[in-house]
Image: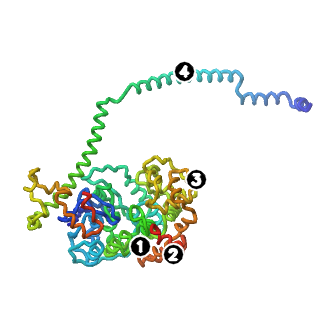
């Protein structure tokens, strides 16, 4: 793989070329097979930057090119020894050329999507600036996904009144299958990486919570994952980001989506919370994500489920089938707490899971090792917040995390 | 008794003045009658209007029911929709082939020695059935070097997905 960045005012364009052994199909860090759509994208920054550290450009490029790189990656400007080593150790990929010093920075920014999890992070870190990734159409790839209202999400981010940097990019259209999206989960940070020197970033906080970090949630392993390659600080991506001087920080990595939901709903940004990508004036209420989050919100608010989605709808089909589910811990939590859940679309799942309030009580507290892996400059704040506002899991509860999907 | 006493006690002139004042504040019977008549007239007018509007609605409904989209036109719409979808898919294929084409070009220009190696890359003349360079439209069955994927355990089966 060979990578070339060109700057045109505030727009940075990246193009990559496949080496002989590279392929248009590959897998990202969670194992999902991915098919390439095209080999160029752009990132529009809010202002023109004179210089960007080569490691930042290289890592941003790597968040897109990694799935399709087989043996080596050649960047157009020399990177640091540390980053080359991290890519070599993490992926077995030879990265170069090497020949620049490592960078570092001081501040922590939040990669802010506007969903409940990142609003919870924002509530924990009230003075951290936001960096928001906004999807824009790719000039070469037909955009058949205009229902994705990234413009609405960007407006909501601006309405928070927080210090905000919006970066606009079409990098998701480099991915054709399963659908356009971040080639690696970390591509959401590509714009933040390019802005890292400008914003003096030493860390980037994500809203990835207990399920994503420790329980192998979403489309990953669905079991306890202390060595999660995406989000563990000692995993391949954690080391690559650290080498570029932008540490991965998961302030809510130790708490479940029930806790982040409660934090978001009690936050002053409640009015700007939006986990739905489709709705304009509010969440659409009909997509799978709205259904999943409604279960969690109803559980947190201890009220019946409010949805028009019926069991026959495609978005509800997976809940009629037996587990395992992605995000299963939250389905258990919701089924145990939503009054009358047996008569909803989650009724079948509730019968399969048989969860109770006491069997899901561990999801109300923070898993202590998640605090220990927060980089030192920000660990104290997170620990104070978690001990003060949430409470830590005891040994039995922590064992629930550590035996998840295994026992 | 009390009323009578009270009545007797109020001087006639004052009583008249008070009653006259009251009368001035309230509408007379004649006026009431006229108002009721006016209201009735209005109701009848509105009823006639509603009847004619109902007739109009029924008429329009009948018209709508009669108007069916021209099948030729809907056929064209469906066709345009299908074509847009297929063009998008085809364009994606073109874009992907462009990536593969550049991959082939780079291989030829940067590693001419390897290109001639045995069994590595099919030469253009090795695909007589198409008469074209095989590189840009290479498919997984023709030239994919799947063994190289083993540098990354995670990409192990990627070669078969192409």
* Secondary structure of the residue carrying numbered label 1: loop
Distance between the alpha carbons at the discs numbered 4 and 1: 79 Å
> Tags 3 and 2 in contact by the CB under 8 Å rule?
no
- Dot in front, 2 or 1: 1
Q: Residue at x 70, y 21 (%)?
A: B30
Q: Both on one chain, marks 1 and 3?
A: yes
Residue B68 is at least partly visible in this image:
yes
Q: Both on one chain, marks 4 and 1?
A: no
- Residue picked out by circle 4: B48
> Tags 1 and 3 in contact by the CB under 8 Å rule?
no
> Tags 2 and 1 in contact by the CB under 8 Å rule?
no
Distance between the alpha carbons at the discs numbered 2 and 1: 23 Å
A350 left or right of B84 in image? right
In-front residue for pair B103/B77? B103
* Secondary structure of the residue carrying numbered label 2: helix
- Residue picked out by circle 1: A226
Q: What chain does badge 4 belong to?
A: B
In-front residue for pair B26/A361? A361
Q: What chain does badge 3 belong to?
A: A
- Residue picked out by circle 3: A340
N-terminal of the two: label 1 or label 3? 1
- Dot in front, 2 or 4: 2
Residue A290 is at least partly visible in this image:
no
Q: Residues within 10 Å of mark 1 (few under 14, many from 20)?
A: some
Most extreme residue toward the right is: B1
> Tags 4 and 1 in contact by the CB under 8 Å rule?
no
Distance between the alpha carbons at the discs numbered 3 and 4: 53 Å
Q: What chain does badge 2 belong to?
A: A
Report the disc number at residue A384: 2
Distance between the alpha carbons at the discs numbered 2 and 4: 76 Å
N-terminal of the two: label 3 or label 2? 3
Most extreme residue toward the left is: B125
């Amino acid at each position: 793989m060979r990578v070339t960045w060109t700057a045109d005012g505030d727009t940075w364009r990246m193009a990559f070329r496949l080496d002989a052994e590279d392929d248009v199909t590959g897998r990202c860090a969670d194992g999902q097979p991915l098919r390439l759509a095209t080999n160029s994208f752009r990132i529009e920054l809010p202002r023109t930057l004179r210089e960007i550290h080569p490691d930042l450009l290289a890592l941003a490029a790597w968040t897109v090119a990694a799935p399709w790189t087989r043996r080596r990656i050649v960047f157009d400007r020399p990177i640091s020894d540390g980053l080359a080593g991290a890519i070599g150790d993490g992926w077995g990929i030879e990265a170069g050329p090497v020949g620049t010093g490592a960078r570092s920075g001081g501040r922590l920014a939040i990669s802010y999507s506007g969903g409940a999890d990142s609003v919870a992070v924002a509530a924990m870190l009230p003075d951290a600036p936001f960096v928001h990734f906004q999807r824009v159409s790719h000039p070469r790839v037909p955009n058949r996904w205009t229902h994705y209202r990234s413009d609405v999400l960007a407006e909501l981010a601006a309405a928070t009144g927080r210090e905000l940097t919006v970066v606009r990019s079409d990098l998701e259209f480099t991915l054709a299958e399963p659908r356009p999206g971040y080639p690696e989960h970390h591509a959401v940070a590509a714009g933040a990486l390019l802005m890292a020197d400008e914003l003096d970033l030493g860390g980037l906080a994500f809203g990835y919570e207990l399920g994503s970090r420790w329980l192998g949630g979403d489309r990953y392993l669905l079991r306890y994952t202390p060595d999660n390659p995406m989000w563990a600080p000692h995993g391949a991506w954690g080391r690559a980001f650290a080498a570029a001087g932008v540490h991965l920080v998961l302030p809510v990595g130790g708490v479940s989506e029930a806790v982040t939901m409660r934090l978001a709903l009690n936050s002053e940004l409640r009015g700007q919370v939006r986990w739905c990508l489709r709705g304009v004036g509010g969440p659409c209420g009909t997509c799978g994500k709205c259904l999943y989050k409604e279960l969690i919100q109803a559980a947190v608010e201890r009220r019946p489920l409010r949805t028009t989605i019926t069991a026959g709808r495609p978005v509800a089909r997976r809940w009629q089938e037996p587990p395992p589910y992605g995000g299963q811990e939250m389905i258990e939590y919701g089924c145990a707490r939503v009054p009358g859940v047996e008569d909803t679309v989650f009724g079948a799942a509730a019968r399969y899971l048989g969860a109770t309030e006491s069997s899901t009580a561990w999801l109300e507290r923070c898993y202590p090792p998640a605090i220990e892996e927060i980089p030192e400059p920000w660990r104290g704040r997170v620990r104070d917040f978690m001990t003060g506002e949430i409470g830590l899991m005891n040994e039995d509860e922590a064992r629930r995390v550590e035996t998840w999907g295994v026992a | 008794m009390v009323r009578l006493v009270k009545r007797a006690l109020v001087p006639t002139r004052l009583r008249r003045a008070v009653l006259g004042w009251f009368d001035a504040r309230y509408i007379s019977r004649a006026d009431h009658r006229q108002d009721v008549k006016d209201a009735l007239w209005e109701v009848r007018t509105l009823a006639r209007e509603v009847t004619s509007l109902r007739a109009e609605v029924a008429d329009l409904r009948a018209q709508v029911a009669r108007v069916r989209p021209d099948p030729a036109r809907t056929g064209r719409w469906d066709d345009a929709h299908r074509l847009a979808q297929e063009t998008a898919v085809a364009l994606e294929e073109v874009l992907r082939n462009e990536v593969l084409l550049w991959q082939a070009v780079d291989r030829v220009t940067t590693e001419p020695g390897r290109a001639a190696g045995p069994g590595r890359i099919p030469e253009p003349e090795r695909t007589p059935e198409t008469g074209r360079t095989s590189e840009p439209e290479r498919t997984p069955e023709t030239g994919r070097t799947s063994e190289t994927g083993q540098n990354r355990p995670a990409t192990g089966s990627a070669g078969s997905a192409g």
